[in-house]
């Protein structure tokens, strides 16, 4: 780095530090606006990871938060304790500031998604921390995941788990504690369904087979039960458990992207559920766009495992609202049901990386609007 670059970094650092300290000292908003006008970087984070937006949230200054957002403050920056400015607002129970930050996040993600959908090349570069994922381990790369070895085991608490190695961690592909979520999901999808005596069911992603087993345990078996699963170890597990011989069950040994043409030919599903591993929100959004052709009609029901961003309240909230907006665009109306998740029991994770640490799971139930 040459002397000019060193000098520029020094100037930006001093300006960033001054901006944050001025906010924390409660300086008048006009003074803060002048610092920003003079070039103080809104992206700067100090030694504790605080950004100007964090500082404004700490001070509970709604006007200042709005000003910083309008000027381009980074909504998803996390401090050294992994808190966003939205999390700071939540800690003070300051709903107006939290909603300001959350809505800014949703607008940002909607714009990025729109730009991505209009581009035939790579998605636009951004500072986005939610949709854009740079993790190239099995946890976030479908290619790496499909080439990785899976383990089906029981942990010391007797919980069934399916895990994969991701970097230095073991990550749960699916774990037994999710059964309560799956039970509530199947109730929402199937109870009182107009076609309950002749259900055509589609499930994307087998995992431990929890939800597929629940479908098979309905009082009336589905007449058609498609399961899309690409991982060779999962497919072998399914063979060992006899899934290939269950009546009405048809297993497509591929990703949903490769199976979609056949699924669209079948069409007319009464129940559609998707719970993939290693895919990001962009993949889920692409799946949403096929729903009008997959669902049989207004009585058909759709759900998905709503677990993206579920280690951070703000990120989870953004994903939930974003999915509702995108589903609305394809004519699917969503209702949400809160399911209590027992996160007091830290033993449920064993030695695996946690992927859902919030107390409430928001269960989506979608139906086409005609």
Image (tube, grey):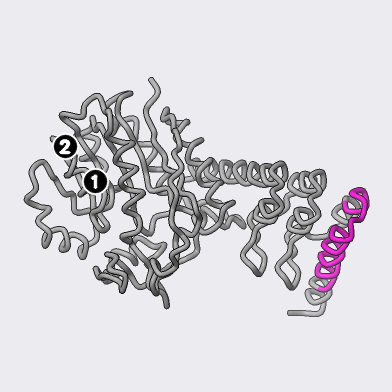
Judging by the rendered image, the residue that carries numbered circle 1 is: 259
Judging by the rendered image, the residue that carries numbered circle 2 is: 219
Q: Residue at x 26, y 28 (%)?
A: 193
Question: Residue 202 placed where, x, y %?
Answer: 24, 41
Q: Secondary structure at mark 1?
A: helix
Question: Residue 297 placed where, x, y %?
Answer: 29, 24
Q: Residue at x 30, y 25 (%)?
A: 299
Magenta stretch containing residue 20, yes or no?
yes
Most common secondary structure along the magenta stretch: helix
Mark pair 2, 1: CA separation:
29 Å
Magenta stretch containing residue 143, yes or no?
no
Q: Is residue 158 above or below residue 113?
A: below
Mark positioned earlier in the residue sequence (2 or 1): 2
Classify the position of the N terminus by image quarter: bottom right
Question: Residue 177 placed where, x, y %?
Answer: 35, 58
Q: Residue at x 39, y 74 (%)?
A: 351
Label 1 environment density (alpha carbons within 10 Å; few <14, some 14–19, many ≥20) = some
Question: Residue 291 placed where, x, y %?
Answer: 34, 34
Q: For residue 26, what is the image quadrant? A: bottom right
Residue 186 seen anywhere in this rendered image of the structure: yes
- Left/right placement of residue 128 relative to residue 38 reads left
Taking depth in this image into account, of 347 and 22 the one nearest to the observer is: 347
């Amino acid at each position: 780095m040459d002397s000019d670059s060193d000098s520029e970094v020094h100037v930006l650092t001093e300006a960033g530090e001054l901006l944050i300290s001025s906010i924390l000292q409660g300086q008048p908003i006009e003074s803060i606006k002048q610092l920003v006008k003079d070039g103080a970087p809104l992206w700067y984070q100090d030694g504790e990871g605080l950004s100007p937006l964090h500082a404004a949230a700490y001070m509970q200054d709604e006007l200042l938060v709005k000003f910083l957002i309008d000027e381009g403050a980074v909504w998803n920056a996390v401090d050294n304790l992994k808190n966003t400015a939205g999390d700071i607002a939540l800690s003070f129970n300051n709903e107006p500031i939290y909603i300001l930050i959350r809505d800014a996040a949703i607008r940002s993600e909607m714009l990025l998604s729109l730009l991505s959908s209009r581009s035939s090349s790579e998605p636009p570069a951004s500072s986005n921390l939610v949709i854009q994922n740079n993790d190239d381990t099995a946890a976030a790369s479908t290619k790496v995941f499909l080439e990785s070895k899976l383990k089906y085991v029981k942990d010391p608490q007797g919980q069934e788990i399916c895990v994969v190695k991701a970097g230095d961690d073991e990550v749960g592909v699916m774990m037994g504690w999710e059964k309560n979520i799956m039970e509530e999901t199947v109730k929402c999808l199937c109870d009182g369904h107009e076609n309950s005596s002749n259900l055509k069911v589609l499930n994307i992603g087998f995992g431990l087979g929890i939800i597929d087993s629940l479908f098979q345990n309905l009082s009336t078996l589905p007449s058609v039960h498609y399961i899309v699963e690409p991982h060779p170890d999962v497919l072998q597990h399914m063979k060992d458990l006899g899934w290939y011989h269950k009546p009405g069950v048809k297993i497509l040994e591929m990703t949903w992207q490769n199976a979609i043409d056949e699924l669209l030919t079948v069409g007319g599903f009464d129940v559609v559920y998707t719970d993939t591993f290693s895919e990001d929100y962009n993949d889920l959004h692409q799946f949403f766009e096929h729903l009008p052709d997959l669902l049989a009609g207004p009585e058909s029901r759709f759900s998905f495992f709503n677990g993206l961003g579920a280690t951070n309240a703000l990120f989870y909230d953004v994903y939930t609202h974003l999915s509702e907006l995108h589903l609305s665009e394809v004519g699917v109306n969503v209702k949400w049901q809160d399911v209590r998740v027992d996160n007091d029991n830290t033993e449920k994770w064993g030695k695996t990386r946690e992927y859902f640490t919030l107390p409430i799971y928001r269960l989506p139930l979608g139906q086409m609007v005609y």
